[in-house]
Amino acid sequence: MREGILRSGWMRCGACNGVTRWPECQARCGGLEDRSDDARHRSDVVRREACDPSIDDTRQLASHGVVPPQRVRRAVRWLVALSAWIDSRRRPAEIQALSPDPSEASPDVSEKPTEADAPPSATWIPPGGAELTIAEQRIASGMIYVGAHLPPVAEPCDVEPALIDPRLPVEGGRAARLEETMTCWPAYRELSPQHRAEYLGWLARGRREPDIDIGYVFLFFYGLERRLLHDARHAPVGEVERAALEAEILALHECYARSASFRGYASGLLGAMWMGEETPVYARLPPPEEPRAGELPLLLRLGLGQLLRDGVPVPAAWALSWALGDPEGWPASLATVGRCPDALRERFHARYAETFGSGIVRRPEGRELIVHYRPASASFGGGLVLAAPGVPDVAPIREPVKRLRRLLERCMAELEPASLRPDLDR
């Protein structure tokens, strides 16, 4: 039902199609509708204000392409007041009609909550937090969101994808084999009862099963992203919790290395979680070693920038990662490796020490590190802008990368082709 106002102050009723003054028609049939173009324009302005909280005055309306004249602004205020009055006068029967009785729901409730045993709002269970039992699965290690509702970080989703709602149906027991694979961007609420059972079982068993569908790993990973990149702004992550989350991401990165996509997102989160922090990541984290055409990984940019900032010689492991991350790309023989073979790593470390001694030392230069980071979770609705004040961005620096690339090519030429084959079993 749309509410509007005609220039004469009369209303058109959507129920009886008659034109009358709004108090009379509202009392008689409760259906008001205005079909004039002018009122439709004003109601569109009202809807835009209601849907977009960033529009709170006429100046902000200008930024959205709507600058109503004075008479329309008065009409907008009047329509808002009218809408509130109509809602307050709505009969109890009408209100109940908007909230149907759960007992009258359709038999197919596989995707709707069936029990009221979830907390009214979501709760973050920290690492080592209280043990939970959900659908007969005992989950003891925490690092999950549990509850009835948790809004997403941005608009694309209705509910946070990582949220575990205990009211949703779960098919008892672990599914022996699921015929359907997970979606590209899974959400717990949208999983089938069988997939929910498998996911909860995976959580209860410790999350270390290399052959599990990678969709379950991403679904759990979404919660880590939210805790570190969004909720940490109003509920800071303590040192102990941050260390536990870091260790979990590293363990997932190692266990599910078969997925190049997950390796990239896990490495990115390891860098993103330390952006803006004083902690030097080069002293606590290994650098990413897989070739990535097009850009330097965030963790690598942060670690190298901190090395330059602190005047510390670049260690061989970080120098190798810098060479592998060259955005100009690599020959197919190395691009197909996926991960740096042990033989190539050892040879590079030896030649690097011969050439640069304790490591390359370079003075900080250029702009500060500011990146547009894109999380894996659809909850964020896109990218985030992250900054590391005081840390130089090494991405534009080319001279040391060219020297490191020549050194790496020399090492590759010294090795047998068989030594450059992927060794993912290590």
Image (spheres, grey):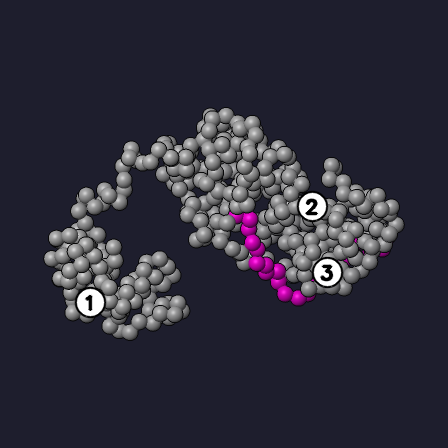
Q: Which amino acid type corresponds to the residue marked 3 in the rendered image?
A: Glu
Of the pair 137 and 211, the residue shown nearer to us? 211
User: Disc 1 designates what residue?
Assistant: 6
Any magenta on residue 358?
yes
Residue at 34 percent of width and 61 percent of height: 48
Q: Position of residue 187 (x, y in %)?
A: 48, 42
Lower position in the chain sequence, tag 3 or tag 2? 2
Residue occupying the far front of the picture: 17
| Discs 1/3, front | 1
Q: Which image quarter holds the C terminus? A: top right
Q: Which amino acid type corresponds to the residue marked 2 in the rendered image?
A: Pro
59 up-or-down from 339: above or below: below
Q: Answer with left or right where residue 16 lies relative to residue 327.
A: left
Q: Is residue 144 visible in the rendered structure shown here?
A: yes
Q: Main secondary structure of the magenta part?
A: loop
Q: Position of residue 320 (x, y in %)?
A: 76, 51
User: Disc 3 designates what residue?
Assistant: 328
Residue at 16 percent of width and 67 percent of height: 9
- Name the element at disc 1: loop
Q: Position of residue 314 (x, y in %)?
A: 74, 54
Q: Are marks 3 and 2 in contact (CB under 8 Å)?
A: no
Q: Position of residue 217 (x, y in %)?
A: 57, 39
| Region of the chain picked out in magenta, as a range | 353-377
| Discs 3/2, front | 3
Q: Marks 3/2: CA distance?
A: 23 Å
Q: Answer with left or right where residue 119 lies relative to residue 20.
A: right
User: Disc 2 designates what residue?
Assistant: 286
94 up-or-down from 13: above or below: above
Lower position in the chain sequence, tag 1 or tag 3? 1
Q: Are marks 1 and 3 in contact (CB under 8 Å)?
A: no
Q: Which image quarter holds the N terminus? A: bottom left
